[in-house]
Image (tube, rainbow, N blue to C red):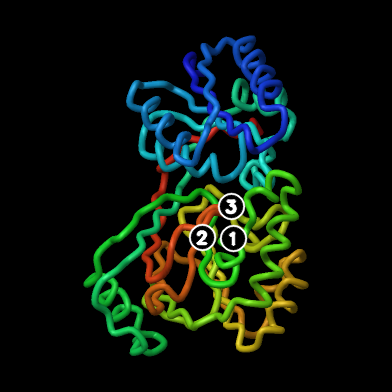
């Protein structure tokens, strides 16, 4: 077990932050850790502090907050010896839920103290820009041509994700989330944003290329590194964070009402068998669409717009998980 740890807490993720942080520090110190605690004040603090901690050789960064704060830490400490621990206090905490990390502060700290450290993959997404023949995409099956098109473009932005990347409808919903209401009603803010997206989003086509050389077209894409989505919903049945590949859902959504059918089937994992849904595995995914037309989200936060290149990085993150 590491002896030095940085605890990064997002005070917006749950009320009475001082009380929760004090309990976590007490539990971790009682377990033998030397703990430094810091509270974020703005977006980017967690990433900056986690990067500094990894550079100093701190063995563990424990994140007390939601999926967004965890994502910042992942972007800072991936590919370093520093391990990541989760103390879930956010609105969703999808990864923690899937791994079986409890929401109670003391119980989650016990996972950090007595669990095991596993090496898991993360996703890397690059938003692309530059000359490309938009509107004149390669035909289905011409994945190599799509990759060649992407290779001629430049990287405008790069980020890592632990859970998933989404393009189209769900990213538009994420971009509409009212952050003030999110702190008050949690998941309800996402449901309200999803309703707005359903009524207002005009979904253009996305051309999707896979490393196997195939392509597909759809109006929404979810590239999953884990099994669940938005909490308990099995977006990628059979998926697991430890797998060295993505599970990819491409939703063609020829008509708007088809989204309702997909949402009804999603809680049971039956959406992957519906007409107009492509479910496949891939180690890399290319998303092509006219610039500024298709929004992209990662781990529940808006990132930018397609086109984009997504790749899996095996063994990039050391993660504290419950013991078997």
Q: CA distance from mark 3 to mark 1?
A: 23 Å
Q: Residues within 10 Å of mark 1 (few under 14, many from 20)?
A: many
Q: Position of residue 160 (x, y in %)?
A: 42, 50
For residue 81, what is the image quadrant?
A: top left
For residue 199, what is the image quadrant?
A: bottom right
- Check disc 1 and report its element: helix, strand or loop: helix
Q: Residues within 10 Å of mark 2 (few under 14, many from 20)?
A: many
Location of the C terminus by quadrant is: top right
Residue located beneath label 2 in the image: 297
Of the residues under marks 3 and 1, which one precedes in the sequence?
Answer: 1
- Asked if residue 210 can be seen in this view, the reply is no
- Check disc 3 and report its element: helix, strand or loop: loop
- Check disc 2 and report its element: helix, strand or loop: strand
Q: CA distance from mark 1 to mark 2?
A: 7 Å
In the figure, is residue 38 to the left or right of 229? left
Q: Is 96 placed above or below 128 here? A: above
The residue lying at 66 percent from left, 48 percent from top is 180
Q: Residues within 10 Å of mark 3 (few under 14, many from 20)?
A: some
Q: CA distance from mark 2 to mark 3?
A: 20 Å
Q: Position of residue 167 (x, y in %)?
A: 51, 68
Residue located beneath label 3 in the image: 240
Which-is-in-front pick, marks 1 and 2?
1
Which-is-in-front pick, marks 2 and 3?
2
In the figure, is residue 324 to the left or right of 217? right
Judging depth in this view, the residue of 301 and 85 nearest the camera is 301
In the figure, is residue 233 to the left or right of 78? right
Of the residues under marks 1 and 2, which one precedes in the sequence?
Answer: 1
**Contact check, label 1 and label 2, Cβ < 8 Å:** yes
Q: Is 226 placed above or below 108 here? A: below
Residue located beneath label 1 in the image: 174
The residue lying at 38 percent from left, 32 percent from top is 51
């Amino acid at each position: 077990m590491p002896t030095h740890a940085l605890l990064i807490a997002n005070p917006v993720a749950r009320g009475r932050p001082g009380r929760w942080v004090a309990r976590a520090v007490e539990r971790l110190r009682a377990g033998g850790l030397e703990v430094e605690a810091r509270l974020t004040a703005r977006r980017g603090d967690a990433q900056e502090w986690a990067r500094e901690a990894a550079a100093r050789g701190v063995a563990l960064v424990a994140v007390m907050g939601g999926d967004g704060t965890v994502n910042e830490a992942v972007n800072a400490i991936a590919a370093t010896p520093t391990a990541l621990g989760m103390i879930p206090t956010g609105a969703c905490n999808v990864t923690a839920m899937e791994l079986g990390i409890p929401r109670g502060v003391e119980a989650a700290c016990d996972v950090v103290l007595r669990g095991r450290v596993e090496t898991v993959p993360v996703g890397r997404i690059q938003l692309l820009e530059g000359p490309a023949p938009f509107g004149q995409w390669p035909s289905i099956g011409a994945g190599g041509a799509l990759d060649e098109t992407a290779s001629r473009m430049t990287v405008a932005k790069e980020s890592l994700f632990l859970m998933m990347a989404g393009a189209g409808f769900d990213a538009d919903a994420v971009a509409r989330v009212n952050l003030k209401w999110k702190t008050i009603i949690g998941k309800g803010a996402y449901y309200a944003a999803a309703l707005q997206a359903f009524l207002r989003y005009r979904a253009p086509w996305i051309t999707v290329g896979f490393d196997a050389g195939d392509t597909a077209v759809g109006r929404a894409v979810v590239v999953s590194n884990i099994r669940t989505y938005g909490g308990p919903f099995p977006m990628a049945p059979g998926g697991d964070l430890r797998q060295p590949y993505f599970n990819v859902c491409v939703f063609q959504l020829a008509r708007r009402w088809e989204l309702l059918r997909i949402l009804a089937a999603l809680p049971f994992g039956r959406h992957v068998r519906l007409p107009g849904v492509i479910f496949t595995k891939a180690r890399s995914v290319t998303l092509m669409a006219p610039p500024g037309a298709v929004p992209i989200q990662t781990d529940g936060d808006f990132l930018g717009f397609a086109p984009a290149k997504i790749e899996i990085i095996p063994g990039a993150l050391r993660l504290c998980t419950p013991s078997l």
